Amino acid sequence: MSPRPLALLVLLAATVLLEGCTLSRAQIRRADAVVAATTPVAPLCERADHCARPSPLLDAGRQAMAASTPDSPRHVVALLNASEPALVARLDLIRAARHTIDVQTYIWDQDDAGRLVLDELVQAARRGVRVRILADQLFSFGDLALLDRLARASPNLEVRLYNPTFREASTSPLEWAAGIACCFFRFNQRMHNKVLVVDATVGITGGRNYQNRYFDWDDDFDYVDRDVLVGGPAAAAMADSFAMFWRHKRSVPLTHLRDVNRYILAHPAAPGWPAPEYAHPQRVYRVEQEADDASWLRAHILADSLRTGPVDFFSDLPAKTDQPLKRQARQFTAHVMQMIGAARREVVLQTPYLVLSRRARHLFERLHEKATPPRIVVSTNSLASTDAFAVYAVSYKHRKRYLKKYGFEIYELKPHAADPAAANASASLEWVGEDARASGDPAQDASQRYVGTESHGLLGSHGSSQRPAPLMSEGRRFALHAKSIVVDDRFAMVGSHNFDPRSDHYNTEAGVIVYDRRFAEQLRQAILRDTQPQNAWVIAPRRPVVPVLTKLNQAIGDFSESLPLFDFWPYRYATSYQLRGGCAPMRPSDPAFYSCYEPVGDFPDVALSPKLIYTRLITAFGSSASGIL
């Protein structure tokens, strides 16, 4: 079929879908009536506190709230770098909620992590807590049977999907194509905020979604990510932001979605809420026990927490998706830019994707032109670590600009980084309970608490489009997903904002800015650990071998890079370096750098594959698409 008839077919399909987008009020009322008639009404707890469990985390938030005044806010803040405390903190707060739980996210998968948190929320609703879940439609809850069960799990539980394609929960390949053909601008804008807030007193925000790989539970591919727990007035601001999104016209209740509505009407019998089944039940059991262990929570979360003053929670407004050029809609994005623009001495930036918007390019260029420019340290992904190879290709194209024009020091995560691997080793292991130790099995060492999990091949059941490039090495792979900035050791940001045009102009983003030197230093050290030689390659200019030939190659490369298309020149200005044995780590600007670091190629550890070829092709042809990648 020629491109023109195919395009016409897609547009025709889009027209047909659009005509049937809106449900009638009668259809919505019928589905609502079925839900009301088949939802258990009586709460499982009659106490005023809805049988909330004690929580040192929520207690710390209440203390901060009580000590705050409008002119002098007080907060408790805890970095959640490690995945296990990040998950256990969520479980603890959900169990401790007395009044409300609001959850906002970009991805909600139906693997062990997603099922565990969802079941905890259902149980909280059933004991009388008001629970609201707002998830971006494109990558959450595509299973209609699950959405039917959620709609009827409890009258205290409400679920809405944000910006659903053609008012449906599940998007087919045809609807995906039709959405791009007919409504590209709207289809391309997503809600990327990640927030969990309990009783408007304690909240968690950052980069993690509800999926195994964000908590070191995927057997093949996991993310290095980060959240921050905040108790005090900033948590109330999280609750206010959530309410604004919840009321927005793009947040659609389940019975207002065409496919969910049809499913409920076709299945009027109460579906119930069965106990979840887990691929690794002992691993789940372990974190469930830790969430009820106050001493564990104090040791692994509160021990390094800080009592501090001002903390600002910022979120882009939902209007960003309607009027993205209006400055007030890009509140969080604007604050990120203001933070960096105020740098005097140093910016430490961690981002999965290094594709700068025009505004960011101008900002870094101005910083670098100062008489004494600040040091700019960037921790990001390598092609070997990332699962977004198309985005990486655009970043790769502009390496020379980043190094020379902006003065970046760029460190790219290794796919088998040593420190993330050590952290993963404890998070992904399973509990050996008393029954196993009492069995007398000689294979079980009574001094060992954990056993290893299984491996099921590259990326398990994840789709091929989510798979990173194949490697020459073997083993569990890690990709950077954390989004954080530290400026001059004075203040720091943790949030959902990737440093790319999509976060600047399309997606709504959220995060916190903490104005505390101690917190800034904690975060700075966490990011710099990911730049150490055992965890990252450093990007630096190639060392001239044949001066005349090198200069000629660079001149051709400069010309090729300046072209919007046909950037095929394979010899780039910079490449990846690895520390030699016996040398101490040093910056690329150090005169001894080339005596202690050896080049390992532009794409170290990446095997020859279609994705490597695609990366080269996108470098050549894809720079104009950087805003939507």
Image (cartoon, rainbow, N blue to C red):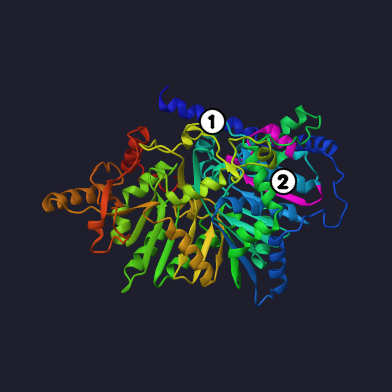
Which x, y percent locates residue 165?
Answer: 60, 38
**Image: 368 above or below 387:** below
Residue at left 60%, top 35%? 442
**Image: 392 above or below 21:** below
Which x, y percent locates residue 629?
Answer: 44, 45
Q: Secondary structure at mark 2?
A: helix
Q: Disc 2 marks which residue?
A: 120
Q: Quadrant of residue 454?
A: top right
Q: Alpha carbon of mark 2 to alpha carbon of mark 1: how far? A: 32 Å
Which x, y percent locates residue 9?
Answer: 50, 26
Is residue 610 located in the magenta-colored stretch of the structure?
Answer: no
Residue at left 83%, top 35%? 38
Q: Locate the N terminus by quadrant.
A: top left
For marks 2 and 1, the one nearer the N-term is 2
309 lies left or right of 1: right
Regarding residue 410, the answer to whether it shows in the image is: yes
